[in-house]
Image: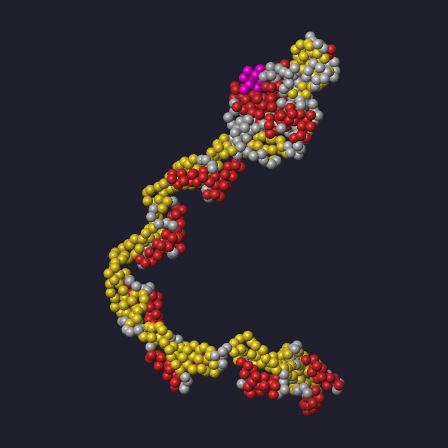
Amino acid sequence: MRKKSYKIVTTMFVSLTLFLLFPSASDAYIDLSTYKLHTGKFNGENEAKAALNRLHSETEWTGKYQPTGVYENYYQIQSSEMADQGYARNILNQFTTSTGIPAYYVGIGDKLLYYQLITGGFSGEETVKQVLQALEKETGISGNYVGLGTKQDYYKIISGGFTGESTAKKVLEQFKNSTGINASYVGLGDKLKYYQIISGGFTGQARTIEIMEQFEKETGINAFYTGLGTPHNYYQIISGGFTGEAATQKILQQFEKATGIYGSYKYIGNNRYQIISEPVLGMNKVNIGREFFKSNNWSVTYKDTGRVGYDRYQIKSVPVLGTQQVNKGRNFYINNKWSVTYQETGKTGYERYQVISDPVLGLDLVNKGRNFFKTNNWSVTYKATGQSGYTRYQIISNPVLGLDQVNKGRSFFIKNNWSITYESTGRIGYEGYKVISKPILGMILVKKGQEFFKNKNLSATYQATGDRLAQYQIVIEDIIGYENVRAANLKLNQMFGWMGTAIKTKVGPKLMYTDYGMSLSSMIDIQMTKKPQTDMYRNEARYVSAEFVDMTKQIITGNDVYLRTAPSKDSEIVQKLNMGDSVLVIGKTGDWVEVRVTWQNAKPNDVKSYLDPNNFSIDNTKDYFQFLKLSQPAQLNAAEVNQRILIGKGILAGKAQAFIDAAKKYNINDVYLIAHAILETGNGTSKLANGVEVNGKTVYNMYGYGAVDSCPLTCGAQTAYDNGWFTPEAAIIGGAKFISQDYIYNTTFQQDTLYKMRWNPKAPWHQYATDISWAYKQVDSIYNIYQMLDNYTLYYDVPKYN
């Protein structure tokens, strides 16, 4: 084995068969344990079998069904009692439609006869309707009414025309009050538009009111007035005090004459009076009044009354019908040489209306209505509607069960002095009814049925029938990885609504990928600068010039001696050899010596075959052990390790506890430590492992720490002496410390897998060995040790190159 003077670590893997797409780089582990998925809940084997067939048909997944050991009971739901058979039948129909649960209804209690109540006659259809409604409201007994006697025709009474809608309304009210016959009025002739007549502006509110009253008087058209422009405030002008009432009266007269503003005065004490104007509109009037007092050097103020008004107003009519009325209103203003306009209101109406009665039954009512119009000298006609009816009706109840119901209905009519009889229908029924479901499976349907009756204000009970059905579930086995089983469970839930439970059947490895941000070709170029070695050509013929070979000692006698593939200076140069290098001499041919050399320079393709992680499959678990993380103890049993693994391993025999202690102390995989020690010590037989004396003390080195190619024994022993490894146990535990701090937990170049130890993608200058197959070769002993163990979890860290 070719190695450098660096510290070491090794890795391991376990065999599993699985299928995974290569994932994106992630710090999280991918669980590759084997699971089975228990999914669905099926009542009976037939339902389970159908579900399994559907699963295979729609997903192409295979599985099996198996009983869960749980049984579902059959139940029957029974409603509370209902008095009416028709109601029970209606509830039954709603129950089966709403819940999908098949059911039936049964009678309970004694059998009773059904009867019908039959009344005497009632005058008019409206009267019989009211009686029937009162019967149902007071007794709960429903029924229908039928006509008595001979049918008569319905007629409508139709008046002549009345001018104006208000007149038609008035006649209509008189007609209804006088005859008791309902009616309505309708327009005659063409529809006319409604208009509004709008005057120009008039100064002053009083003047406007005067003109509006004149307009209404002359035209008969009602109107109202509105302000024009911006409203102004009303004010009162208030003088200072004047001595004596006579003097005050005189000043008030002068004020009114000079300003045209009226006012009054009031006593304010001590024979003094104050003048107060009537409310005046706007500040112009206020200033006129104030100027009167100021020009006489009299004190004056004013105040806002809180009211507003306008300088000018306009008059608007109420809507009038047709242009004839519009012209009538316009002429009033035109004749007085006042401005006037008009506009449409958007509404329409009629000039004349007629009154039409609701349909009345028989000519007696027709004549009553006609007489109203005739006595008022108004035109009137009538016509048949094509419908007919009765003047008297009788009520026939729906069938009622038993004489108690009959007497209840009879009492209603008797107390109102109405004639009543009854007769049997010939049918029989029960005092009450219940809806009962057919046997249904499981409490879900039971609760669904109970909820239906609760919403109908009915109670419901249930009981088991004694029958039951086994429940089954579908089992899908050999699903690799937690994410895969989780995705399968989600898919089945989305497709079929099944809920599932994942059960781990075999503990598998956990996998993560580390992306080093470089291409594989770049990594190969870097590794080629480190002069990687291989023993894959050790059995191929190589040639060295005879002048540089000691045939007896089988060593090279010069430096920079070419090792060639053929006995010719034109052949390919494999590498250079230096003085003292060992070779296996096969024979001499002329000036050339045929030799065999174990360690030779590796070619780029040789390096790629071991550097590229894609060349190793997780299906071949042993090869994958080079990616096993070494930063977690395997929790071994010392007695088991001594008996199964270390027995017959020379100095290592019986030392299992030292390896376990070292693993726990430095958090290293103890299987790796054992495998490494077995490999480095030649199964516990190497001289360095069995003790070398240094400075009078025997020292031990179990991992080859410090034993470089050029100085294996002396340097390895000196390293052991320097670190105080004076017992095999001290060497096992002490060497583990350097493996932990220099490789597995080194913050600069953490090398916690065999692959990282050999290639170290993060810091390629720090590599444990030059042999390109070094990591691959380390796994056998680790793998073999794991085959002796029963419970463990493997953690893989696989590099990813672009």
In the depicted structure, whether residue 443 falls above or below residue 525: below
Image quarter for residue 282?
A: bottom right
Query: Which is nearer the eye, 515 or 454?
Result: 515
Residue 31 within the magenta-colored segment of the rendering = no
User: Quadrant where the C terminus lies?
Assistant: top right
In the depicted structure, whether residue 304 falls above or below residue 802: below
Relative placement, left or right, of 126 versus 164 is left
Image quarter for residue 236?
A: bottom right
What residue is drawn where x is 39% and y is 75%? Answer: 358
User: Quadrant where the N terminus lies?
Assistant: top right
Considering the whole magenta stretch, tell me its main secondary structure. loop
Spot occupied by residue 494 in the image (x, y as percentages of width and height): 49, 43
Spot occupied by residue 549 in the image (x, y as percentages of width and height): 71, 11
Residue 651 within the magenta-colored segment of the rendering = yes
**Residue furthest to the top:** 552
Color scheme of the displayed model? secondary structure
Residue 11 makes an appearance in the image: yes
What residue is drawn where x is 29% and y is 72%? Answer: 148
In the depicted structure, whether residue 672 falls above or below residue 91: above
Q: Which residues are magenta?
A: 645-655
Query: Which is nearer the eye, 262 or 212?
Result: 212
Residue 635 makes an appearance in the image: no
Spot occupied by residue 330 in the image (x, y as percentages of width and height): 59, 84
What residue is drawn where x is 53% and y is 34%? Answer: 481
What residue is drawn where x is 49% and y is 81%? Answer: 351
Spot occupied by residue 174 in the image (x, y as percentages of width and height): 42, 82
Query: Which is nearer the eye, 531 or 267?
Result: 531
How many numbered markers are drawn? 0
Query: Which is nearer the eye, 241 or 723?
Result: 723
